[in-house]
Image (spheres, rainbow, N blue to C red):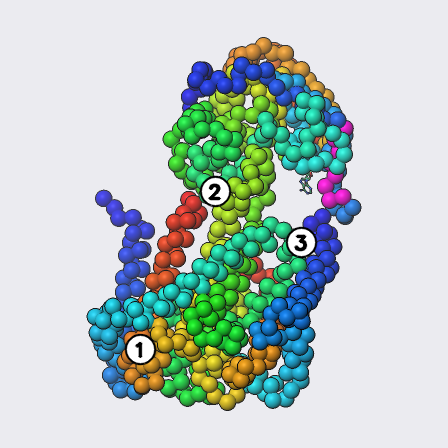
Amino acid sequence: MTISPRLIRHAKDLGLQIIVVAAVLAVWKLGTEWADSLYFPSPNKVFAEVWNGWILDWSNTWEDNLQPSLMRLLSGFFLASFFAITTGIAIGRSRTLGDYVEPIIHFVRSIPPPALLPLFLVLLGIDDTMKIVLIATGVFPPILLNTIDGVRSIDPLYLDTATAYRISRSRRLTHVILPSAGPKIFAGLRISLSIAVILMVISELIAATNGVGFRILQAQRQFKMVDLWAGLVVLGTMGAFLNGVLSLVERRVLRWRRA
Amino acid sequence: MSIEPMHEESVDDSGAEASGSLAATDLHHVYGRGTSEEHHALGGITFSMNKGEFVAIVGPSGCGKTTLLRCLSGLMAPTSGSVMLEGVPVESVPKDLTLVFQDYRRSLYPWLRVDANVEFPLKNSGIGKAERTERVRQALEDVGLSGHASKYPGQLSGGMQQRVSIARALAYRPHLLLMDEPFASVDAQTRASLEDVLLEVWARRRKTVLFVTHDIDESVYLADRVVVLSNAPSHVMAEIVVDIPRPRDQIETKATPEFVELRAEVARLIRDAGTGAGKPAGDS
Amino acid sequence: MASASRSRRVPVKWVRGAIGAGVLFVALEVLTRAELVTAEYLPPASSILREVFSLLTTRAFLRDLWVTIQACLIGLAIATLVAVPLGLVLGLGRTAYKATIVVIEFLRPIPSVALIPLAILIYGRGTDMKVALVVFACLWPILFNTIYGMHSVDPVAADTARVFGLGRIRIGTRVYLRSASPFIFTGFKIATSIAVILAVSAELIAGGSEGIGIVMLEEASVGNQKTVYAVTIVTGLIGLVLLGALGAVERRMFAWAQAERAVA
Ligand SMILES: Nc1ncnc2c1ncn2[C@@H]1O[C@H](COP(=O)(O)OP(=O)(O)OP(=O)(O)O)[C@@H](O)[C@H]1O
Ligand SMILES: [Mg+2]
């Protein structure tokens, strides 16, 4: 019986990952103990705080920090995704429409998303509506542009085939155009998710009374370095989790690509 | 591959009159008109085919066969000339017609499994679920892909993909079937069986078939009539009636003197088509 | 045929783009003039545009603008000087490459903007803090793309160079650096957008006295919508100019390379 070379390679990669992560933690621990820095607490303390301050107090952390953050982020993200994909398909299908609106889209895209915050602050105030609108506006352009690109780069023969079989307009849209633009749309969604997290954090650092970002800000104001680092770890975990979910959805929706 | 002769349960359209008389008059097509890369592909093609006929088209590579099929099917408007189906001008793809594309790889949807690809056009025409499933099963069996229904096209070889695109057209059951080099990528063995499947379906359902091929043997073996096109701008150089009796047989028919004679005649015409325009005669 | 029709299309495209922008402008103007939207939400488009011009000719504003851009440029320069050599070395071996990827994957989910509170504690609220953040955030995309580029070097080219007796260092610069440069440039482009995002965010969060983010916050706090709109538009213009310039450089310098886009 033989073990396939691929399996060996996977095992090696996994081993390497474990070693690297362990090494990072070791450097972190030894470095902080040796330097005894004010700003870099040792990982033991940070993870202890994650455990005691966040996980053991789950119902409070969920209600005060995680749930508000997730609500803002996901509302903005889904709102923008829906409108960006639908308008992206419309613009992608019509050269003329695209010609008229593309310069505007490119301009809006080149505004660094956080720079929108003061404007929305003054227009919408500091409540959740502002944060959701900010996130939605910031993630809109990448999804829109990727959708347009995906719809435009559809293989013309896919459409000819649909015509040859007299596929109706609506089915052509949902069953031919949308799936063929799928990979590009997901690329846009992935970029957008990271922008959404950035905007969520910034809006919570500037104008919030709850959320993960707010808790990090509080820790900073009270000079609680361990709490601050624990907040970063939680935020990182949240980001990784959301990314993981998106990847899972993508793998499922685009599973034909691995065929 | 099974070449099952009769499927009594689904003779829905065989009782009807065989339909699909198609006539093209003085078709011209020019690509990129008014640009430096203008190309006159069709140079006045006139021909017609009757209901129930099996016509093969042969011609040098690049002479405009695919262009012709696209114009005939209504996918593309010719620069000038007319296409009539049963006396009605063809402006968009008619209901009882479909096309098997030459570029089969790009005409299957990679996000649909094989059976879903075959079933996809049927969902449009109000056919019940049970009937659809049966048609898909039958068509995949006809092309010898029964075991591959739940794979994605990307998991199949080129020849298998080509057969899926044929199965899709068979399951759709158009009266008029236009096929653009549909067997080009399958191995010789499978090709012979596919030819016989096609002939059998054609005879049973009284379809009208227009079949583009590079293979002279294939054209003579399958068709009632072989239309030979010239180099671009192409026109009809000759039409050869193949009066070999049916049913035909892969081995016996191809050994008959008539077959050998007709094949030589077509080959000669194609060679002349190539040299006539001062170019080598394609890749066939 | 394709190229001919494309070149004919370009002016059409520009005309339509201009019409689109013009229609938007007029629509916004009419919206406020007809008092369908109060000036509190949307000052007349023409007044915003005038404000953009007046800002761009005001010394004080240009100083603020320069403070922000300066932080970006210094941070980008440091990040490039660190990440490119590091990437060239790490890119030579498979294991180092994979190890780096793990570290990057490990750090990636933490949005760099979340480090702003920490950076404020360590570096204060001035330029140092912004530069430090920009360096940290820009290091990764440049490093990742450099390593990625090293792996795209055609081994045949490297062998050929060896056969011709080029020394190690010269192989390094001639073959590897040249082949990897389009990827490095892609990383640099990504890093540039990130740099602007971080510098502006840092100003918004840290406060302070100068910088374009500060101008926006101050104007917002006194309810001067017109100027806030105008500054937001200016940030967009900067983005357009920066990315446009980088795009032009890329097309000129790396036309030979059909560089695959590596996204870090
Ligand atoms: N969309 C197009 N634009 C410009 N020229 C085209 C286009 N499609 C085809 N042509 C040109 O028209 C000519 C005929 O093409 P067509 O595909 O109809 O030939 P064909 O007979 O089907 O060739 P083959 O036997 O290789 O399939 C070729 O010279 C081709 O380059
Ligand atoms: Mg062809």
Q: Are marks 1 and 3 in contact (CB under 8 Å)?
A: no
Q: Where, by quadrant of the figure, is residue A51 drawn?
A: bottom left
Instruction: Give left or right: position of C54 versus B126.
Output: right
Q: Which mark is residue C90?
A: none
Residue C105 seen from this side: no
- Looking at the rendered image, the disc whose residue lies closer to the viewer, 2 or 1, is 1
Q: Residue furthest front?
A: C35
In this rendered view, identify the residue nearer to me: B57 or A182.
Answer: A182
Q: In this figure, which residue is indicated by the disc labeled 2?
A: B110
Give the x, y percent position of residue C62: 61, 85
Q: In this figure, which residue is indicated by the disc labeled 3?
A: A96
Magenta residues, start to end = B26-33
Picture residue at 47% right of the left edge, 71% below the top = A130
Q: Disc 2 to disc 1, how far (Cα)?
A: 46 Å
- Looking at the rendered image, the disc whose residue lies closer to the viewer, 3 or 2, is 3
- Amino acid type for the residue under numbered disc 2: Pro
- Amino acid type for the residue under numbered disc 1: Trp
Chain holding disc 3: A
